[in-house]
Image: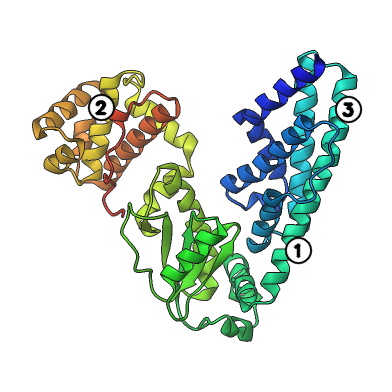
Amino acid sequence: MGTAVLGAVLRDMVGDDAVVDEVIAAARTSPEVARLPVAENRRHVAVLLASGLASFERPGTDPPDHDPVAALLGADRAEQGVPLTALLSGVQAGRRRALEIGVDRGRAAGVPDAVLLDALLHFDRHAGAMERHVISGYHTAQLELARTARDARTQVLRRLLHDGAEALPSDEIAQAGLDASARHHCVLSEVTDPVRARALERELAVPGALFGLVDGRFAGLTPRPPARPSAGQGPLVLVSPAVPLDGVPAAHRLCAAALATASAHGLSGTRRLTGLAAETALAAQPALAALLAGELLGALDPSDDFHRDLARTALTYLDLGHRLDLAAAALHVHPNTVRYRLTRLAGLTGIPDALDDPRVLPTLRWWWALRTWLDASRSNGTVSRATQRPAGSRRPGTE
């Protein structure tokens, strides 16, 4: 009886996002693991939890001699440049947190301690075997990388993006194929899979460019901006203005901040870093954004579909340069409908004076408040498909 109850508890854990988030938080106590995208940490935790569940559902069996999923995790971390000690630290921290949650939930469900102890001992054997497979995959990939010049170039790229040109001898920079006297565009993408990263590298390759996986994401330096499809097509790729090599770490940090903002808003395709300047800067001040939205848009009810239509219409109108015709086309309504909604919004918030104000700051405040209010409504699950921002609407200057 206790075994069946514990099995149900463990299956619930694997499918519980709150549990996964807690285990991810434990794994990210390792700074090198925390540099990876959360999606990579989630894949890491999925391997851990699946291994634990599989061990419980095969009582009395020995751990498998080979675990290709665990080995692939180790190989990917080697190619992403995560030190093995950091990888194992993250695996073990996540493993401990998963065990703690399993014990707490098992006891709360009335599972006898003897059943819990037996299951934990069995899990520990399987988890130890999984770690060995991760290490094996890591070492195998590390040996393969060491046989190529790619790894040496990628190490140069990582040091340039993290520490700058001062941290490297000029001959190492030259051997990596970079001109230390030239200015380079910093490139950062949401792509994390090594196979997709290599395909993207082939697509973006130009003489004098250097690409690789840095902190788990595809990144690089290139003497000229990528000639790729425009915004909305392909994976999200951010490109900074050209900077000297000693300015690369700052550009990389800004790209990382902008990538998080762009990804949160579902953007894709190639984007200029400077085109996302306002969104990135404003995203760094969530408390101020909430205060602003509350002050300017406090009369709106996020559960009211019509109020959300009003806010979305005003934001689209601002995004498209105060053009009624463009806003109407983006929203698939008549221009008179846009004008009517703006008038109704005026009655609630007084926004039209700001919409027609030629000064930048009043308009920016309303734009920020509207965007914050709509984003908060989406996060609370109150925005329907019909009231989401149309594809292609943007703040002037973005791409």
Mark 3, other Cα within 10 Å: few <14 / some 14–19 / many ≥20: some
Q: Nearer the viewer, mark 3 or mark 2?
A: 3
Q: Position of residue 332 (x, y in %)?
A: 17, 35
Q: Is residue 284 left or right of residue 333?
A: right
- Amino acid beneath label 2: Asp
Q: Which residue matches tag 2?
A: 309
Query: Which of the two labelled residues, at mark 1 and mark 2, occupies the earlier sequence position?
Result: 1
Position of the C terminus by quadrant: bottom left
Q: Look at label 3 and name its amino acid.
A: Asp
* CA distance separating discs 3 and 2: 57 Å
Report the number of numbered marks.
3
Q: Nearer the viewer, mark 1 or mark 2?
A: 1
Q: Looking at the picture, tell me which residue is in the foreground, 15 or 188.
A: 15
Precedes in sequence: disc 3 or disc 1:
3
Residue named by callout 3: 118
Q: Earlier in the sequence, mark 3 or mark 2?
A: 3
